[in-house]
Amino acid sequence: MTSSEDQDINLLKRQIVQLKKSIQSLKFKNSKIYRVLNIFNIITFILFFQYAILYFFSINRSTVNNRDISFKSGSQLNDISKIYVLYFNYNNYTFRVKINKQLPQYYQSKNITIVKDLVFNIPQKIQFDNDNRWFIVTQSLPVLTICCIMLFITIISYIYRLNDIPNSLFSLTFFNSISVLGIIFYTLYFHNFF
């Protein structure tokens, strides 16, 4: 055999390998597991997206009367600044809000507006009546962090079409399912189911 025939044979072998890979990819794309995993990933994306959107834009608001809330405040000292913590109980939930200055006593007699997400019903921010400042509920920050990280990973994997590759789709589904389970357990703990 000549060198040109060897090159042709090697080229044919590479083409055969590429054809086998494309056939496997098409089989995977037409399988039920591909559809189920992508639907699950889209549902988790929607859950994470609604949490982040409602957090940043404060859409889902509800006003709570002051008589339904009991306040307790305290201070936490560190070397740099004095941080005040406002604890308030509402419907058997205790929320902790950190603020950088002590609120006047009359704030505890005002009604508050609570922002919650739609699915997990976790309070995210509070606002006192006639005050433009929002105060972040510190228990909601870990959930927001997980949601933002998983939104970023999911967007990147769909932009670069990594969901067409079986191993990356399984990995994405695994991370999404662990994140959702963690948030569900946190929500159950937060709502005193444990």
Image (cartoon, helix red, strand yellow):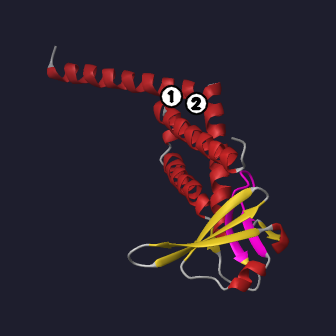
**Tag 1 secondary structure:** helix
**Residue 182: x percent and y percent?**
59, 43
Check if residue 118 falls in the magenta segment: yes
The C terminus lies in quadrant: top right
Residue 143 placement, left or right of 119: left
The correct choice, above or below, for 3 with respect to 77 in the image is above
Q: Nearer the viewer, residue 72 or 120?
A: 72
As measured in the structure, the alpha-carbon distance from the residue carrying label 2 to the one carrying label 1 is 6 Å
Are the two marked residues, 2 and 1, in contact with CB atoms closer than 8 angstroms? Answer: yes
Residue 150 versus residue 36: which sits nearer the camera?
Answer: 150
Percent position of residue 161, x then y: 50, 43
Majority secondary structure in the magenta region: strand
Residue type at mark 2? Answer: Lys
Q: Residue at 66% across / 38% down in the picture?
A: 39
Report the residue at 59% width, 54% height from top.
143
**What residue is disc 2 on?**
29
Please give the label number shown on residue 25.
1
Q: Is 135 situated left or right of 168 in this image? A: right
Q: Quadrant of residue 2?
A: top left
Q: Residue at x 67, y 62 (%)?
A: 95
Amino acid on which the number 1 mark rests in the picture: Ser
Left or right relative to 31: residue 70: right
As drawn, the residue found furthest toward the left would be 2
Q: Could one spot residue 65 in this view of the protein?
A: no
Q: Which residues are magenta?
A: 112-127
Identify the residue shown where x is 16% and y is 13%.
1
Residue 153 in the image: x percent, y percent? 50, 49
Neighbours of disc 2 within 10 Å: few (<14), some (14-19), many (20+): some
Count of numbered marks: 2
Q: Is residue 26 above or below residue 108?
A: above
Secondary structure category for the residue under label 2: helix
Residue at the far top in the pictured view: 1
